[in-house]
Amino acid sequence: MSPHRRFHHGGQADLHQLQHIMRTIEQACISVQMHINPMEAEAVILSLRQSPLAYQACLFILENSQVTNAKFHAASAIQEVAVREWAFLTDDEKRSLIRYCLSYVFQHSCSTDGYVQRKVSAVGAQFLKRGWLDFTVGEKEAFFTEVKQAILGCHGADAQFIGVNFLDCVVSEFSPSTASAMGLPREFHEQCRASVESNYLKKFYCWAQDAALSVTNRLLEHDATVSEVKVCTAALNLMFQILNWDFKWNVNAVDGANSRINVFSSKVRPEIVLPNSFECVLVQPGPAWYNTLISSGHVTWLLGLYGTMRQKFSHVGSWIVSPLAVSARKLVVLFCSLTGTIFPSGLTDDLRKNIKMQQLRNLGVAISMARALEHKQEISKGTMYDGQMQEHHLLQILSCIVQWICPPGTITAAINSGKSESEFLDGCRALLSMATLTTPQVFDKLLRSISPFGTLSLLSSLTCEVVEARATSDTTEETWSWIARDILLDAWTVLLEPKDPGKDTTLPPEGVASTASVFKLIVESELKAAAALAFEEEDDYFQASVSAMDERFNSYALIARRAVDLTIPFLTHLFSQRLSMLHQEKGKSDLTCILEELFSLLLFTGHVLADAGEGETPLVPEAFQSHFMDVLGAEQHPVIVLSCTIIKFAEQSLNPEMRSAFFSPRLMEALIWFLARWSNTYLMPHETARGSNCSQVVNNDRQQDIKFSRNVLIGFCGEHDQGKYVLDVILRISLMTLISYSGEKALQELTCYKLLPALVRRKNVCVHLFTLDSWNDLVNAFAKNRSLFDLVSPHQCSLTETLVRAASGIRNSEASNQYVRELMGQMVADLLDLTSKADLRTIAQQPNSIQTVSFLLARLRGAARATQPRTQRALYEMGVSVLNAILTLLEVYKHESAVIYLVLKFVVDWVDGQLVFLEVEDTAVVVNFCLTLLQLYSKHNIGKISLSLSSTLLTEAKTEKYKDLRALLQLLTSLCSKDLVDFSSDSLDKESADIAQVIYLGLHIVTPLISLELLKYPKLCHDYFTLVSHILEVYPEKLVQLNTESFSHMLGTLEFGIHQQDVEVVNMCLGSLNGLASYHYKERVCGKEGLGSCASGFRDHNGQVIEGVLSRFLRSLLQLLLFRDYSFELISSAADALLPLILCEKDLYEKFGQELIEKQPTPELKLRLANALQALTGSNQVSSSLDRINYKRFRKNLQDFLIEVRGFLQIM
């Protein structure tokens, strides 16, 4: 009999015992608050959940304790115990638990312990959901009838607030995103969500609305009590939460889920991802909500309520941030996101007819029958359909919120004088929501119908005011103007960026002028701010400007591109003006402010002219391709003029005198960044870039004009025009920055990682590189002298990779290989010469020698990373020629962790690039070298951590060892790829290297070096289990070849892995177990040995008996599934591992099950567990095969088994 049953049907619990438990819990709660032995106190509190008197004690504490925290923990305990034991409770006991929670919160509705009330309501809501699929409709209605009466005010304002609060908990619990964990499958939560959404959610909304209406008059006409204000606030919050529901089951019932027909946009995404992380969730409840939200005048009531309260309390400055005001505004803003088939656009004839008739009924008796017939005819013509109804809805809201944000100057001045910005920011959010749903034309038309200016003009004015407020702010912290600016920029983004190809993003004429004005003000404000900060030290300003604020600049670029006829000449004017000022002030005054302004202009111009192109080839922006049709040649095209102005300015940096006067490292950073971004788009673009991606329909004459303008723009830096000249300039600037700006790591990083790689990204550009003297100068500086040896190792690596990748521009493979040989020949010779010196061990530890070795290894690694089919042979020869040198370095520098790491990373990248191309003989060379390297690493015990080190040195040692071991694991993983991908020409009959054997030998060497402590490093842990899961699933037969120590260590790491929090790691470990057990079972079925002694058990080197791998993990996995916490996502993977383990170890499984049964305290529990264990393997037609169907059946059985038994087994 369960504890709950004993509580309800057994004898009275001992009063003194309950009082003792209550005092103990109270004292523990006080100790936690006072930080007196908090861990012991928390253990006492948690013990309540395991008490045999848990129910009685928890209810006693709730009713009698004077310590609020004790009551809260009692509610938490009863929540966990009841959910855990839910399957044992009778139907009456389940219902009584819910009734108790309701009774408690209503009886204590006047209590000041608000968070206890909320907790008990949440507990009741969870109990309600847990039994939801079992309760009858009548039982559900009985629960909600009491709640409804309270919400409607039948029991006073305090009970009314409690009723609304309880429904809030119910909605939160039934929404999967905020639901409590119950250890139940996702299908259960979805079924509960579907049921509530279809049958109750709209009722809850109406009840909340009625609750708010019941206290509205007192709020508006009299001085309402605190309780009545709380009721209205809670009701508005509940309505907000309900509309935030992720509607799925009745959304867009006419057209299917997540679809809509609307003139605002042909297709609107259910969720809009905005660059500045402001959420804009589309509210799509479907046509069933039309009467509740639209035709009932609900929105009018809400707007009237807020407007009236706003006017009434206008003299109370703090009212605008009161919970009631904030809740009302949140709901208003959310209504701006209302969309989908709740508006009758695109409905079927039957549903359209029903809505029409409902509209007629809503006209009321005041309309005569004749007028009603006229109205019916108007509706039948569609005057309020196809978007007009939604437009009217948005206009209705806009007419209210415009008071929050207009006039912008007056509002922002008031905020700067101390008024709260809360209402202003909500108004900006409302505009963002409207912009999300509409096209620019419709968005602008909204306000124009009630004012002399459009909504775009308002958005422009707001943006300008906010930008100016931000510019005049004397703080660098995120203020209200910062937040408002980002919200408004998001509004511009969703209006102007054509995410949906079918969405019309054409601006009205006034809109073009507005966007140009906004962009001009933004640029001027940023330039003013740059000049003001010119003398402040900002070490990472460039990265902050370009990386962290990239999304903001992208929004600026969108605005600029919608008025290119105005904004591009404006940028050209500003840049030319600053250049003139620079030359005029040379030698007369400090140029820092002008240089800072040029710095900012380069960032603006780079974003406007070109897209980032990360991971793709950027095209010339469509705005530039379809404009400037009146240009007669390249010299008149505004984009070309602006580009040439900047390139010519950059070219001046090649003059030493000019470089010394103007080109600071900081300005050069911006120039290099600009050239890299610009080159990706405009430098010798592919001919395909000349195609049009314009979606607008244009006549033939206009089409010809657009084509001419596009060809002028794209052809300007093409292969047959100025492309080679610009490429030459950029190359000379690149070499100059690497040589002349020695020690400027940030500048050199941009050159090596951004600019030069951009030049070798396209083959057609690479072809021209080899015709330029500037390229030959760069290659010679790299290969034949030490002028570039000052670069740090990572930059050396990137530069080498770029130089080798350029070989794609050489016409034939042999010439490409010869180029690579000549490029890397000196590096190889230097390394071989260094490692062959007789006094190597003496000179090796000198700083110069270490630096030289590091640079050479970095260059070799960069070349290896650039492996391509046409250069593979030369790079293979390069690697083979230095193999012995690499082993020498590994021996000589065994105590230099930085050098060892570079050695390992070179080997990893070289092997990874080469292995798939190699023939059998070459593969054997590489594999044997890898084994030798692994053995040498192990021999010197490189990475060994001494326990005598200080904590700081110990941490550093662990970090270095972690990096080395990651590299070795990546090396072994690369070797695995040979069995998966092989481009060699050898026949299948030709005997090849046993990759599996090599990998296991490698594991035998590496595994002892990997401690459980090191596996706490997430990346190392992931790499290790990626490798282990692969080889155990693909080559399980090789496991027996590991020696005892390595085998035991691997089992220990697997045990460690299946108890990790990382779901991916646990999944890989479970896959490993599945591979091992499946292999052994299938082999034994065929009469073979399988895993042999590894499966049956063995003795380790100390003579201790080691349990067989399968029996060990069968027991461990069952313990995990039954008694530990884990993600429900793992059950399918766990089932796939558990089934073959059970088939392999049936006797152990039965023994384990019998032990569990015997531990149960009552016959009822013993029988229940026995039946569940029997059903796990004997129901649902589960057989002894390991085919896909049987796995699927067993997954379902395991899921049912865990739901059935986990609850009561957890309290053993």
Image: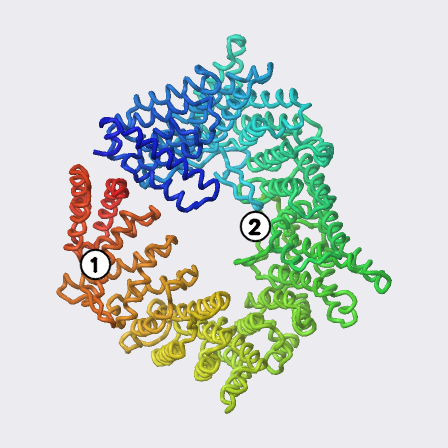
Q: Which residue is mark 1?
A: 1111
Judging depth in this view, the residue of 237 and 114 nearest the camera is 114
The secondary structure type at the circle numbered 1 is helix
Quadrant (top left/top right/bottom left/bottom right) for the N terminus: top left
* Pointer 2 local density, CA inside 10 Å: few below 14, some 14–19, many at least 20: few
Where residue 43 appears, as percent x and y from the top left, is 37, 44
**Mark 1 vs 2, N-terminal side:** 2
Outermost residue on the left side: it is 1087
Q: Which residue is mark 2?
A: 693
Distance from disc 1 to disc 2, alpha carbons, whole Å, reads 63 Å
Q: What residue do we see at 58% from left, 21% from top?
A: 305
Judging depth in this view, the residue of 40 and 747 nearest the camera is 40
Where residue 884 appears, as percent x and y from the top left, is 44, 84
Q: Is residue 138 left or right of residue 447?
A: left
Which amino acid lies under the numbered mark 1 shown in the image of this protein?
Ser
Question: Can you tell which of label 1 and label 2 is closer to the viewer?
Answer: 1
Quadrant (top left/top right/bottom left/bottom right) for the C terminus: top left
